[in-house]
Image: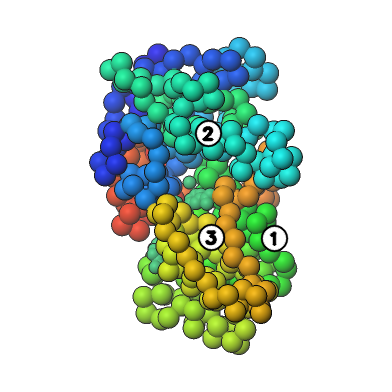
Amino acid sequence: MKAKAAILFEVGQKLEIREVEVEAPKFGEVLIKMAVGGVCHSDLHVMTGHLTAPVPAILGHEGSGVVAEVGPGVTSLKPGDHVIPMWRLSCGVCEYCSGSRPALCASGTQIRMTGRLLDGTTRFKFEGREIKHFAGVSSFSEYSVIPERAVLKIPNDFPLDKAALLGCGVITGVGAVFNAARVKPGSSVAVFGTGGVGVNVIQGAAIAGAEIIIAVDILPSKLEFAKRFGATHTINAKETKPVEAVRALTGGRGVDYSFEVIGLPETIRQAYDSLSKRGMAVAVGVAPMTTEVSVPIMSLVYEERILTGSVYGSSRPWIDIPMLINLYRAGKLKLDELLTRQYPFAQINEAYAALERGEVLRSVVTF
Ligand code: PAD
Ligand code: ZN
C-alpha cells in the first residue's frame, strides 16, 4: 500500500514528505495506521547528526495509532485495537528482559542500529529504494509495520493524542524517577533541562513525594512550565551559576537526586556537582555519541556519589504505561498541560523548528 511519510534522506537536511510503498506485515508483525506522531528532541538529534541512525529513514519514535492489519502468528492484537509503539523492542526472555530492564535487550539495539526489522529487511520503499525504520517505530508515516512485541495495546477510549506522549516523553521522564533513581518521599531533586522530557522528571518527582524540586533551564518560559508540573524552585542558568544556586537552596548540602535532560557534557557535570554525599545523578539527555564526561574521583569515592544513565525510563512498558494511564485518569499525571501544540502532519518541519526555538513543551503531528 501507499502512505505519506516524512523521510530523512541525509543528515543535516529537513524531513521530506513523500509517498512510500509499505509492505504487508510479515510473521509476528503488525500494520499500524498512525493517528498521532510525537515531536521529541531525539529525532532532531538524528537530523543534526548528534545521534547516528541509518538513513534514508522514516523518523518518529513517539506515537499512537490503530491496528490496521496483523501478520501471521500475531496473537495479542487485532485490527481496531488502539496502540502505542515502543521504541525499544525486547525479546522477553533474555537476562535484561527478565531483570526488569527490557530497554537493554539486544533485539532492540539490533533494530535501532540497522534500521531494519529482525529479519534484516525493511517494509518501506521509495522509488524502489530501501527506506529504513527509525527505532523500529517510524511514527512519521501514515502507516508503519512494527513487530508485535513492540506494540502495546491501550484502552480504546483513551485519547490518542495524549497516549502518544506516554510512548517516549512521559515514560522516559517519569520512568527515570521511578525506576532508575527510585526517588524517595521527602527527598530533594534538581532537574537540568525542563523541556518535554524534563517536565516529566519533575512531575514524576512530585508524584514520588520529593519535597524540594529545583528546575534548571535557560528559558524563562520553560521554568514557568516547570512550576506547573511541580517544581518548588527555579534557576535560570543564564543568569545564575546553577550548581551554586542548587547548593544555596539546599543549605550547602546538595540534592539527593539530579537529572540531566538536555544532552550536554557540561550539564551532566553540573548535575553531578549539585549532588549531596551519596547522591545520584541520572543522565537522560542524549549527548553527541562520541562525547565523554569526567567527574572528580574524590567525590565519587569519599562521598559515594553515583553517576548513571537511563534509557527509555529504565521502564517495563507493559507495567509502566498502564500505571501512567491510571495516574492520568486519577488526575495525578499532567498530559493535557504537556501537549502544548498540534500540527497537521504536512507541517512537521515547522513543529521541529518550534521545538528548536524552545517555543513548545511537547507538540504532536496529527494524520
Ligand atoms: P527539549 O528541547 O524539549 O528540552 C531541552 C531543554 O533543555 C529545553 O527546555 C532547553 O531550554 C534546555 N536547555 C538547553 N541548554 C541548556 C543549558 N545549558 N542549561 C539548562 N537547560 C538547557 O528536548 P526533550 O525534552 O524532547 O529531550 C531532552 C533530551 O532527552 C534530548 O537530548 C533527548 O534526545 C533526550 C531523550 N532521551 C531519552 C532516553 O531514553 N534517554 C528519551 C527521549 C529523549
Ligand atoms: Zn523521544
Answer yes or no: do the residues labelled 1 and 3 have beta carbons within 8 Å?
Answer: no
Residue at position x 59%, y 33% from top? 107
Earlier in the chain: of badge 1 and badge 3, it is 1
- In the image: residue 19, left or right of residue 74: left
Q: Is residue 144 above or below residue 344?
A: above
- The number of numbered badges drawn on the structure is 3
- Depth order, front residue of 123/20: 123
- Label 3 near ligand 1 (CB < 8 Å): yes
Residue at position x 72%, y 66% from top? 184
Q: Which residue is mark 3?
A: 283
Kind of residue sitting beneath label 3: Ala
Question: Does residue 37 appear in the picture of this structure?
Answer: no
Q: Which mark is residue 110?
A: 2
Q: Which residue is mark 1?
A: 182
Answer yes or no: do the residues labelled 2 and 3 have beta carbons within 8 Å?
Answer: no
Mark 1 or mark 3, which is nearer to you?
A: 3
**In terms of image quadrants, where is residue 75?**
top right
Residue farthest to the left, as pictured: 13
Q: Residues within 10 Å of mark 3 (few under 14, many from 20)?
A: many
Earlier in the chain: of badge 1 and badge 2, it is 2
Q: Which mark is residue 22?
A: none
Kind of residue sitting beneath label 2: Gln
Give the Cα separation between the discs numbered 1 and 3.
14 Å
Residue 72 image offset from top left, x and y in percent:
61, 12
Q: Check the picture and name the quadrant holding the C terminus.
A: top left
